[in-house]
């Protein structure tokens, strides 16, 4: 039986009623030159430092558009809230947190004069060293899609268009070879869920997919995105990602100019595109269609005849900060806590050594596609600890002298807390001798806590030497307060890893020993994704991405996907699995058997759909907060898509017959309950 996703298509209702402008009439009044002027970006005469500008057509009352980068905050020259990195949001496993996160971004984008937000970024993490991993939602397509849909709804509820990126299979290599089933099951589902959520725009990627540039890939953009999924919005190129005006036939509507590629500078949707129309290579109807797609989304968001209110909202700094702090706290992952060293006690605070530059200087974010925060709110963890625990006796050392003010301070203190930081994509190891620093401190103080500010997994050669490890990611402008809250027990960690932490780089599927075809080094600057001579990376691991690879190959990770401890304990019991014609209901009892309030992310995995499937795949999750000693019955609904696999023979989703294993647990490797999905009662 075929299985189309059951998420509702919400193309217009998110931004209010359909627009009133007569787009067809506007098109009839334009010359060919005017239409083409609406198919490429330009320089903003009132530049605000945003990523892009679309000039509009004043003669017909069509206003300009401003496009801002926005995965972790609105990136313009003015102050805006820097949110926790999206990987931290992913660690919350909370669609409500994602919606609120998106609402902050949308509200601040409106306040800052921006109309399109280049977010969310939902590419699948395949290689732990890809430098943009921290702006994605991790390695699982369902988690990516569920959080993306919620974030999009939040952004667009504020009257700002969301632009989901980068379609597709963009996660490091400049050219990829990927089979049809893997493309459909791993690299496309999150984009489909974004379309189902009503996203206004899609950004195509730099990389080549099976030999064809993503921004010229008619199969991906026309056949799948518009044909199979019914996408009604417009497709924008990544900046400088086009090679030719013929990309308009491949599915791109709007070209954004940028870097010089292979010695050729864009944009191509200018005189080159007009020449292609004049000589018959591009039909005039393709120009009309592209312009119409842009204008219809503008009309949907009230930018044409129904004029937007002239007064833009003010940034509510305190309200935004509240959401940023909540996400940072909910996304905190307690990786290790032997002897219940955390939270810190009054005795710990009476003699506490705080070590590392990230303690005194907040590692709010990383790289440039983000806001930079309100300066007066960039409070580092050390200052937050001192304010929240004014009676604490805290000594601080930056830890730069490995043999001096750090080791001495740690030896004299009851407890030591080391703040370690990492540059995502630079290496698998911590920079600046931090591994040695942690070893030396742990050698003189057995009560050593390591707080990590990273965008993904790092090597931990000192992991067995320290009893407690707390992953705070890049926690945004409120991260100092959030970190202090977690350390002091004012907030409880309930985050789960959205990516697997390997022991060694070679354990990751992209870097697996004996498979050099799976990874190629990045192309030289200026050739990203568009050099036809770039060697491809073959995704020969197929469906075994992330935790699926570790399970399939029986590799023990350092910390598995979905892992995260708490300051309390949770027990699972009484599993029930019921199937109907549209999916499956999985329910079970979850109890907090500890002495503190806590949050648990219960995860539901399905066993293999067929012989080519990985051992387990995430099919659902639910974040639950419970008071000490309390319990509740948790229900997780799995729609029919979760039960299906992509059949290359039928070119469709197929739900297999027979029973299907179902696993419920606290991580991909911490399974607490096992059952089975009953066979379908209707014919296949």
Image (tube, grey):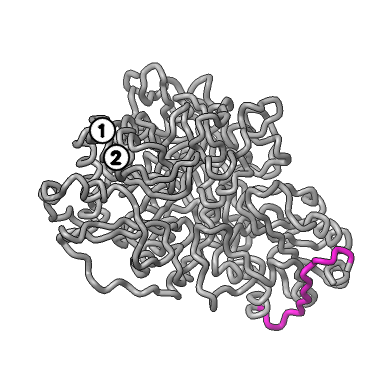
Q: Among all residues in the image, which is located at the extreme bottom?
A: 391
Q: Which residues are magenta?
A: 389-403
Tell me: 162 left or right of 427: left
The dominant secondary structure in magenta is loop
Q: Residue at x 41, y 20 (%)?
A: 648
Residue closer to the observer: 674 or 488: 488
Q: Residue at x 41, y 28 (%)?
A: 644
The relative height of residue 196 versus residue 336 in the rendered view (above or below) is: above
User: Which image quarter is the C terminus in?
Assistant: top left
Identify residue for label 2: 273
The relative height of residue 198 versus residue 362 in the rendered view (above or below) is: above
Identify residue for label 1: 282
Q: Among all residues in the image, which is located at the extreme top?
A: 649
Which element carries disc 2, helix, strand or loop?
A: helix
Which element carries disc 1, helix, strand or loop?
A: loop
The relative height of residue 127 versus residue 475 in the rendered view (above or below) is: above
The relative height of residue 97 versus residue 244 in the rendered view (above or below) is: below
Tell me: 34 left or right of 3: left
User: Residue 498, percent across and down?
Assistant: 56, 47
User: Residue 408, percent across and down?
Assistant: 88, 70
User: Residue 174, percent across and down?
Assistant: 54, 36
- Whichever of callouts 1 and 2 sits on the residue coming sooner in the sequence is 2
Q: CA distance from mark 1 to mark 2?
A: 8 Å
Tell me: 9 left or right of 138: left
Dividing the picture into quadrants, the one containing residue 668 is top right
Specify whether residue 367 is painted magenta: no
Numbered marks: total: 2
Tell me: 8 left or right of 646: left
Residue closer to the observer: 188 or 168: 168
């Amino acid at each position: 039986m075929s299985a189309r996703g059951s998420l509702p298509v919400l193309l217009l209702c998110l931004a209010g009623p359909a627009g009133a402008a007569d787009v067809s009439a506007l098109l009839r009044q334009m010359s060919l030159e005017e239409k083409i002027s609406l198919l490429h970006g330009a320089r903003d005469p009132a530049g605000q430092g945003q990523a892009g500008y679309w000039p509009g057509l004043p003669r017909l009352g069509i206003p300009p558009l401003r496009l801002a980068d926005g995965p972790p905050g609105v990136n313009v020259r003015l102050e805006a809230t820097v949110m926790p990195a999206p990987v931290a949001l992913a660690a919350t496993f909370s669609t409500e947190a994602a919606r609120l996160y998106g609402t902050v971004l949308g509200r601040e984008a409106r306040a800052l004069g921006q109309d399109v937000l280049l977010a969310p970024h939902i590419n699948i993490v395949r290689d732990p060293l890809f430098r943009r991993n921290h702006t994605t939602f991790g390695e699982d397509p369902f988690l990516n899609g569920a959080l993306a849909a919620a974030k999009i709804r939040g952004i667009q509820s504020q009257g700002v268009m969301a632009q989901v990126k980068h379609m597709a299979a963009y996660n490091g290599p400049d050219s990829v070879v990927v089979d049809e089933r893997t493309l459909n099951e791993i690299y496309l589902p999150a984009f489909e869920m974004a379309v189902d959520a009503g996203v206004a725009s899609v950004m195509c990627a730099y990389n080549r997919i099976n030999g064809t540039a993503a921004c010229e890939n008619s199969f991906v953009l026309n056949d799948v995105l518009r044909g199979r999924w019914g996408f009604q919005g417009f497709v924008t190129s990544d900046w400088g990602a086009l090679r030719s005006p013929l990309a308009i036939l491949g599915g791109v509507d709007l070209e954004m100019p940028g870097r010089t590629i292979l010695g050729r500078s864009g944009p191509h949707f200018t005189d080159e595109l007009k020449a292609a129309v004049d000589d018959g290579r591009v039909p005039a109807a393709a120009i009309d269609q592209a312009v119409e797609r842009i204008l219809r989304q503008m009309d949907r968001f009230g930018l044409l005849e129904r004029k937007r209110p002239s007064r833009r909202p003010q940034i509510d700094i305190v309200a935004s900060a509240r959401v940023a702090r909540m996400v940072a706290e909910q996304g905190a992952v307690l990786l290790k806590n032997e002897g219940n060293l955390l939270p810190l006690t009054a005795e710990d605070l009476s003699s506490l050594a705080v070590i590392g530059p990230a303690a005194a200087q907040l590692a709010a974010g990383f790289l440039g596609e983000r806001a930079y925060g309100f300066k007066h709110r960039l409070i580092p963890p050390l200052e937050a600890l001192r304010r929240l625990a004014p009676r604490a006796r805290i000594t601080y050392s930056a830890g730069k002298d490995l043999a001096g003010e750090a080791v001495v301070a740690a030896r004299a203190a009851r407890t030591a807390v080391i703040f370690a930081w990492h540059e995502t994509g630079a290496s698998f190891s911590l920079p600046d001798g931090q591994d040695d620093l942690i070893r030396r401190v742990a050698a003189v103080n057995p009560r050593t806590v390591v707080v990590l500010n990273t965008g993904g997994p790092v090597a931990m050669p000192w992991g067995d030497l320290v009893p407690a490890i707390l992953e705070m990611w890049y926690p945004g402008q409120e991260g100092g307060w959030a970190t202090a809250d977690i350390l002091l027990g004012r907030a409880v960690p309930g985050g789960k890893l959205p990516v697997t932490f390997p022991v060694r780089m070679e354990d990751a599927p992209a870097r697996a020993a004996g498979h050099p075809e799976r990874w190629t080094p990045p192309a030289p600057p200026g050739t990203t994704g568009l050099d036809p001579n770039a060697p491809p990376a073959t995704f020969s691991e197929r469906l075994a991405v992330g935790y699926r690879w570790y399970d399939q190959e029986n590799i023990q990770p350092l910390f598995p996907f979905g892992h995260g401890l708490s300051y309390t304990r949770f027990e699972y019991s009484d599993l029930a699995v019921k199937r109907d014609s549209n999916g499956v209901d999985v329910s079970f009892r979850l109890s907090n058997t500890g002495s503190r309030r806590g949050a648990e992310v219960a995860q539901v995995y399905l066993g293999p759909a067929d012989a080519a499937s990985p051992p387990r795949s995430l099919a659902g999750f639910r974040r639950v907060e419970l008071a000490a000693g309390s319990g509740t019955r948790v229900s997780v609904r799995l729609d029919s898509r979760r039960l299906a696999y992509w059949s290359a023979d039928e070119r469709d989703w197929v739900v297999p017959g027979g029973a299907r294993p179902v696993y419920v647990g606290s991580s991909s490797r911490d399974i607490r309950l096992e059952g089975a999905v009953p066979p379908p009662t209707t014919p296949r």
